[in-house]
Structures are given as C-alpha cells and as structure tokens.
Amino acid sequence: MYSIAALLETDSSEPWHKIASACEYSGVTTHAIPHFSWQTAEQYAVDPLQDRLGTLTKTISPFCFHTSGLGIFSNDHKILFLIIIKTRALLELHELLWRELSGYAQEPRQYYSPENWIPHLSLNLRGLTDDQFTCSLTELSKNNPQFEFEVKRFGLLYVNGNTAGITASFPLTGQAK
C-alpha cells in the first residue's frame, strides 16, 4: 500500500512522548515517518506519479497546520489521533492533489477522498490494551492537544508487511502568496 503524504518537519514527537511517559508504555508510537496522508491506494503508477507530484510541489509553498482535539477510529483496534484543523487552504490543496493524482492510483481508498477526508495524525498504529487506551485518552483529555506542525515536503510512502518507508520525497518550493 502507498500514501501520498505531507511529511512533518517540526518536532512531531511531543504528543507521542507526553502520552507514553504518562502511561508508562510504548503502545503509542512515534511514526518512523511522521506524516498525514492526502491519498492512499493499493498501488500507483509510480514513475508518472512521481513526475506529476514533482511538478506540483514546485507550485506549493511550505505551510503550517494546527491540531485541536482528539479522535478515535475504531476498526479492528482503536486508533487514537490528533485532529488537524481543516482550513480552506488545506481543503483546496487536498482537492488539487486528489484531482491531479487520482488517475495514477489503483484501488484508491475512498475515505481519503475530499468529501470523506478526516485529516489526522495517528498516535498508535497497533492495538492498545484497554488500560493503555484509557490512560492515553485521559492524558490527552487533560490538556486540549493543540500543536503546530510545519510541512516543507511531500512524500510517497509505502507499507509492505512490517516494512515502511519513503519511496520518494518532494520539497515544496513554490513561493508564498
């Protein structure tokens, strides 16, 4: 599986470390690649996608975004996440990327489509015990988890079994308006 993602530049470990130290466990993870996803698909036509994404990122300026609050996805196991505040600029960028890059995707995940997208930063990728989940929720709820992160590059990320990485990285070199 692949994701087109915004790669975080600022110290993104703060929220993860706060929870892990308070709850005395490592169930909450700092991602090897801190990011949020714009689009995810089973497969991409990688070479033409990289060409198009490289062209697009030359027109996009680095940007900051904020989080406010906590969310929970409950599928096979509960995933805690920081909610990214949706701004008009963030939504317009997502719509642009979806429109320009979807044609390269095979089996795109529709929950990342503009009408379904919930921008977020996952705090755990594997299941937590009930105690770990309760502790994490309690610790995060004590302080409204508000953070600012900076994005200076996008990446094409992959997950293959227990292996994950960056296939390609694209600096945002557009000029701010």
Image (spheres, rainbow, N blue to C red):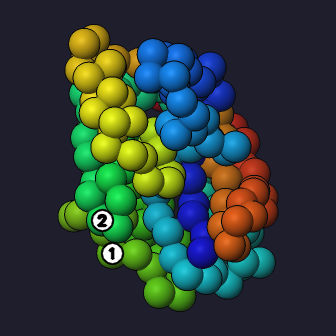
Mark 1, residue position = 110
| Crowdedness near tag 1: few (<14), some (14–19) or many (≥20) residues, C-alpha within 10 Å | few
Residue 121 drawn above or below residue 13: below
Between the residue at mark 2 and the residue at mark 1, the CA separation in whole angstroms equals: 16 Å
Compare residues 92 and 80 and report the one nearer the observer: 80
Tell me, for residue 75, which label it has, or none: 2
Q: Nearer the viewer, mark 2 or mark 1?
A: 2
- Horizontally, is 92 left or right of 106 in the view? left
User: Residue at 62% across / 42% down in the picture?
Assistant: 31
Q: In which quarter of the image is residue 95?
A: bottom left
Query: Residue sitting at 34 percent across and 36 percent down?
Result: 131
Question: Which of the pair 97/140 is nearer the observer?
Answer: 140
What is the crowding at mark 2: few (fewer than 14 residues within 10 Å), some, or many (at least 20)? few
The amino acid sitting under disc 2 is Asn
Question: Secondary structure beneath disc 1?
Answer: helix
Q: Which residue is drawn at 68% across and 73% down?
A: 161
View extreme (bottom): residue:
106
